[in-house]
Image (cartoon, helix red, strand yellow):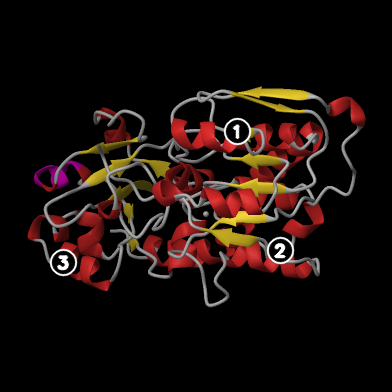
Amino acid sequence: MLSLPRRSALVATAAASLTLLLGACGSGENDKVAPERPSAAAFPVTITSSLGEAVITEEPQRVVTLGQGSTETAIALGTIPVGIEEYTWGSDDTGYLPWIYEAVRSKGAELPEQFTGGEELDIEAIVALDPDVILAAWSGVTQEQFDLLSDVAPVVAYPGAAWSTPWQDQIKIVSRALGKADEGEDLIGDIKKRLSDAAATRPDYPKYTFSYIYNTGPGTLGVFFPTEQRAEMVAALGLRPDPVVETFEEVEGTESAVIGLENADKLKDTDIVFTFYSDAKNRKEIEAQPLYKAIPAIANGAIVAPTEQPFVTASSMINPLTVPWAIERFLPLIDEAVAKVR
């Protein structure tokens, strides 16, 4: 199965795992935290996922989150989880993803407990948190994990395949589980407005095409489709996906295609390349490859390849906290790449 950086490099790199693991705070997002409490009429609610049903009988007080996006959405809705899945790759020196740390601290609230996730999910740690609900709308939680956790609390999992829930649906699912469906719709509208407002400040961006690529080691080359969240964020800022991307065959459930380094020349009409590397060693190896260096955008230096793990993570997912956090860091990098287009 194709490795994609969801979980920890969002995730160190796709090569770190053969599962689909695979992006805020600052000013503004805290204004969107909903002060209203859910009405009693919002419960009970039943949310059906691919793994089973979650029946939530009353407003959750103790929320635990798995995967990504659910934590940020819950915080933006005014509910700070008691426990969250840890993401060492992407966290800063606080030990937390910075937009989460900033949002919680800005409210003078207690930071959530963090626990090991993914295939090594710490069930005992979750049990000790005594949750009322477990939110995992965009995650890789397995059927076995779902069944075990459902004995602890209702588990709100994904409606389709693991790691494939569109960001709008993630917000709708989480907000419904917390009894704040209307506020969730407001969050979606706010994200769209933030992106469109940012795009309006860069009226020249639509002149340029882009491809968002990745590697799983030397000799490999993959391309994300425009519907994948990191590519979707770039497109929402005004750049146009290179039409060639749509000619590639998707690796099922990944919103990407593996085209192989031998087909790097297919990106000859891409103006700007977006990518990331797992570490300095990976970057050196990949950029030393003649076929890779020959991609026109890379040869011209029209490349956006951030090295800071928190930013790579934030720009890889769309949710109420990552979008404002990422935009202010993204635009200067894109401007630099645009200046090098030939």
Q: Nearer the viewer, mark 3 or mark 2?
A: 2
Q: CA distance from mark 3 to mark 2?
A: 37 Å
- Confirm whether the magenta stretch covers residue 264: yes
Q: Residues within 10 Å of mark 2 (few under 14, many from 20)?
A: many
As helix, strand or loop, the secondary structure at mark 2 comes to helix
Mark carried by residue 285 = 3
What residue appears at the point 65 percent right and 38 percent down from the top-left corner?
171
Q: Can you identify the residue that label 2 sits on? A: 103
As helix, strand or loop, the secondary structure at mark 3 comes to helix
- Please state which amino acid type lies under the numbered disc 2: Ala
Question: In front: 177, or 322?
Answer: 177
What residue appears at the point 32 percent right and 59 percent down from the top-left corner?
341
- Please state which amino acid type lies under the numbered disc 3: Glu
Which quadrant of the view contains residue 246? Answer: top left
What residue appears at the point 74 percent right and 60 percent down from the top-left corner?
28
- Please state which amino acid type lies under the numbered disc 1: Ser
Q: Can you identify the residue that label 1 sits on? A: 150
Q: Nearer the viewer, mark 1 or mark 3?
A: 1
* Residues shaded magenta: 262-266
> On the rendered image, what quadrant is the C terminus found in?
bottom left
> On the rendered image, what quadrant is the N terminus found in?
top left
